[in-house]
Image (tube, grey):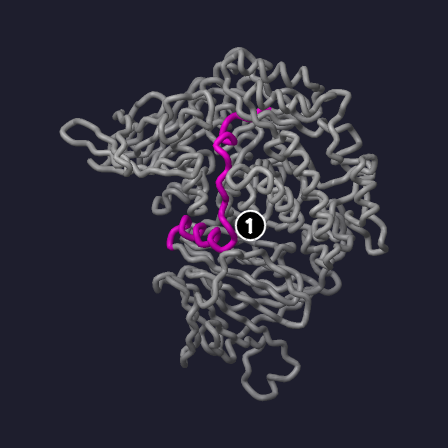
């Protein structure tokens, strides 16, 4: 949201009060408290009729500084996000004649005494960003003021033409020369956020719009620090788009809270962020295999499903998961938890056959909306489990599902009721839950626990996914639970996996899908998937085959569409070959991929990581949005052209093609042309890649059925950590002596090893 008209003027109807000086600074209990009047106090008369902003600095974790700005402290406060990693005593506060400092690990926040207002953030003594004159602002909106992007009515679908709030607080943090900003959730526009206005407000807008299913008020800087605005409510970011030298963030009300995370690299900033808000847990090894869906509005019954599953097996395309989309339930009944007996007359037997006869895991679709015709609506209405309007009636509309209501997850009884439905479904034989939607959350309602509707709009998805995740863990156990979620916000990374929503069947949409994934991976999320071939429309065979390679070199891989099937033989025979090739390639990489996933759970660093995150010292990586690192050592550049041409950047060193063994010098751009059976997948110089000795399933013995492949460029002695799906691990030392290779584990076991 913009408040100014150029450098000197404000927009019509906007009044601004800025923190002008640090009038007094106090240190107590590891925190700094600063009173910042909105005028430099030159005489006693200046203290009258004057607003004062109170700025409090504290530290919830080593290397993290929290800043809270208050105007009127008696006003409603945001609940913020859960921070399970917070600790006491992480900061040391000091005050002297020059001002005050709060130091937490390598990060220091320094407030200068007096005028002008100056708050600097330093890592190891070097300034990384800060807040200066006209940065901390209390803005009031009168007649003729700009209308903020936040809708006044229902979840992004109505706008009244009037500002829903009349007071906002904003902060502005400096941008350095050449500094680039990333993250803010899953954003499908330009990957680098500089120059953009971004609103943190969930919407169901697809991948071809500026809206987002996963809005996260967290950004990551190429300078190696990160910022979280601790508000689930609507937050507006101006990333060098109002004050071009600064990132501005604003939210309605009387307070604003944000946290700065030290690096000094972007990856280390992500580690601190996920240490505070929670890291992705382990997901089962079988979830990394290929998922196949019924698609959405296609016709299907048990015979259709069986023909798809058998067709994959007959064509030697290993399948791990079959997904039943919305129409496993009867139309007009979603969500009611009852299988449509017209097409699935024996669901218990069908699910048993899928497990025992087909050796598959099963996924099923749900959403938190309860259609009026379904049995769960009647029960939920009678027991008061559905969200209500201010007049006490149930909130309903006909968009998506006729007469649908919304489960009120702030009501513990309603949450338990919905979880009982999930447990029943899982005990019946469903292994994974696709938690769709969660963005269309109204603001003209009353929540059971009194939470503000503005807070719940973005936070609802957290409660929804958390309820389902807890039920899955309760039945399946830790390490066996997995979601396939569309919406999320800060902290959602603790309930994986997430997929990219409704894209289209084109090369352009493939590129925007990847931008969204890289943006989400820059926002603290560890795993990510997308609809192979695109959701809307039917891809031509070329797009489908290129997307197969991309999808199977993602952390999670699912074939899914809207009104057409995604079985490979629906396109051409070559698509069958491509699906087989890349599915088996991924399965053969499971020892490498699963170990990478375990490191994600330990550090918060995503499995699929943007190039700037993996190579922070290389300025050539800052704008790369068509390639990524999959784990530490594999560089992947999907082909997104009909011709097969692809441009990619290889960082310095000699890289080796995983598919051909060709060695290519890095430190430069490379142009290649690939057939459908190929794509650029390069191994980092000196890497040791654990490869499986089988490629028929993902959940084999990853410590026993493995061979270590050694690539050129490394030291004579290297180590690699192997991770088992049962939680076991082994560190293996690979030695190259006198032209021979040996690989010995900490247990004394000798591993198979070969050089490329």
Per the image, label 1 sits on a secondary structure element best described as: loop
Image coords of residue 482 (percent x, y): 56, 37
Residue 680 lies left or right of residue 656; in this view the side is right
* Picture layout, residue 125 above or below residue 603: below
Residue at horizontal 59 percent and vertical 42 percent from the top: 474
Residue 104 lies left or right of residue 408; in this view the side is left
* Most foreground residue, 454 or 699: 699
Q: Name which quarter of the figure residue 404 lies in.
A: top right
* Picture layout, residue 246 above or below residue 298: below
* Picture layout, residue 340 above or below residue 632: above
Mark 1 lies on residue: 491
Image coords of residue 398 (percent x, y): 81, 38
Image coords of residue 529 (percent x, y): 54, 34
Q: Which segment is the magenta one?
A: 264-292
In the picture, the quarter occupied by the N terminus is: bottom right
Image coords of residue 24 (percent x, y): 50, 80
Residue at horizontal 60 percent and vertical 44 percent from the top: 470
């Amino acid at each position: 949201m913009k408040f100014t008209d150029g450098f000197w003027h404000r927009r019509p109807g906007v009044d601004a009060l800025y923190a002008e000086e640090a009038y007094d600074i106090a240190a107590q209990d590891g925190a700094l408290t600063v009173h910042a009047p909105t005028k430099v106090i030159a005489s006693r008369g200046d203290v009258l009729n004057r607003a004062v902003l109170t700025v409090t600095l504290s530290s919830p974790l080593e290397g993290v500084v929290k800043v809270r700005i208050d105007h009127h402290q008696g006003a409603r406060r945001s609940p913020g996000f859960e921070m399970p990693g917070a600790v006491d005593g992480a900061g040391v506060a000091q005050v002297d004649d020059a001002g005050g400092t709060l130091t937490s690990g390598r990060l220091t926040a320094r407030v200068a005494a007096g005028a002008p207002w100056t708050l600097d953030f330093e890592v190891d003594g070097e300034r990384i960003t800060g807040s200066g004159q006209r940065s901390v602002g209390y803005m009031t909106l009168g007649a003729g003021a700009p209308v903020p992007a936040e809708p006044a009515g229902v979840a992004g679908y109505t706008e009244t033409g009037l500002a829903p709030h009349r007071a906002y607080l904003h902060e502005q943090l400096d941008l350095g020369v050449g500094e680039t900003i990333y993250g803010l959730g899953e954003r499908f526009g330009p990957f680098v956020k500089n120059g953009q206005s971004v609103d943190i407000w969930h919407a169901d807008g697809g991948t071809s719009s500026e809206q987002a299913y996963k809005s996260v008020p967290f950004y990551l800087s190429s300078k190696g620090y990160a910022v979280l605005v601790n508000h689930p409510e609507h937050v507006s970011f101006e990333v060098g788009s109002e004050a071009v030298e600064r990132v501005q963030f604003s939210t309605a009300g009387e307070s604003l809270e944000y946290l700065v995370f030290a690096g000094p690299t972007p990856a280390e900033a992500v580690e601190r962020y996920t240490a505070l808000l929670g890291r992705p847990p382990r997901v089962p090894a079988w979830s990394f295999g290929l998922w196949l869906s019924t698609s959405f509005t296609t016709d299907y019954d048990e015979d259709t499903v069986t023909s798809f599953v058998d067709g994959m097996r007959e064509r030697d395309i290993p399948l791990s998961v079959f997904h039943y989309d919305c129409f496993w339930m009867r139309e007009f009944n979603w969500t009611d938890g009852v299988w449509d007996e017209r097409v699935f007359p024996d669901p218990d037997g069908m699910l048993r056959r899928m497990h025992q006869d087909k050796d598959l895991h099963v996924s099923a679709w749900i959403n938190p909306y309860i259609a009026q015709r379904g049995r769960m609506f009647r029960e939920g209405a009678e027991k008061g489990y559905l969200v209500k309007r201010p007049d006490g009636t149930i909130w309903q509309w006909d968009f998506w599902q006729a007469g649908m209501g919304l489960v009120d997850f702030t009501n513990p009884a309603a949450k338990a009721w919905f979880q009982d439905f999930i447990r029943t479904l899982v005990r019946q034989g469903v292994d994974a839950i696709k938690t769709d939607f969660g963005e269309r959350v109204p603001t003209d309602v009353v929540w059971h626990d009194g939470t503000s509707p503005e807070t719940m709009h973005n936070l609802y998805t957290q409660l929804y996914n958390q309820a389902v995740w807890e039920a899955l863990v309760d039945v399946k156990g830790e390490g066996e639970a997995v979601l396939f979620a569309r919406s999320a916000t800060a902290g959602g990374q603790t309930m994986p996996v997430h997929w990219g929503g409704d894209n289209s069947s084109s090369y352009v949409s493939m590129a925007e899908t990847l931008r969204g994934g890289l943006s989400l991976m820059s926002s603290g999320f560890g795993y990510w998937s997308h609809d192979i071939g695109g959701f809307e429309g039917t891809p031509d065979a070329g797009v489908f085959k290129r997307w197969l390679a991309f999808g199977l070199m993602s952390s999670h891989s699912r074939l899914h569409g809207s009104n057409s099937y995604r079985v490979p033989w629906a396109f051409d025979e070559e698509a069958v070959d491509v699906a087989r090739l890349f599915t088996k390639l991924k399965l053969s990489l499971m020892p490498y991929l699963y170990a990478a996933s375990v490191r994600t759970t330990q550090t918060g660093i995503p499995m699929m990581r943007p190039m700037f995150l993996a190579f922070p010292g290389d300025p050539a990586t800052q704008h790369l949005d068509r390639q990524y690192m999959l784990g530490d050592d594999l560089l992947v550049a999907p082909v997104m052209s009909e011709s097969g041409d692809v441009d990619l950047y290889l960082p310095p060193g000699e890289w080796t093609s995983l598919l051909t063994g060709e060695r290519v010098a890095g430190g430069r751009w490379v142009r290649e042309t690939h057939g459908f059976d190929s794509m650029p997948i390069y191994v980092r110089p000196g890497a040791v890649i654990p490869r499986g000795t089988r490629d028929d399933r993902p959940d084999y013995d990853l410590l026993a059925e493995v061979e270590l492949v050694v690539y050129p460029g490394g030291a004579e002695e290297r180590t690699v950590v192997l991770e088992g799906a049962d939680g076991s691990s082994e560190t293996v030392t690979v030695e190259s002596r006198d032209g021979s290779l040996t690989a010995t584990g900490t247990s004394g076991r000798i591993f198979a090893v070969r050089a490329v």
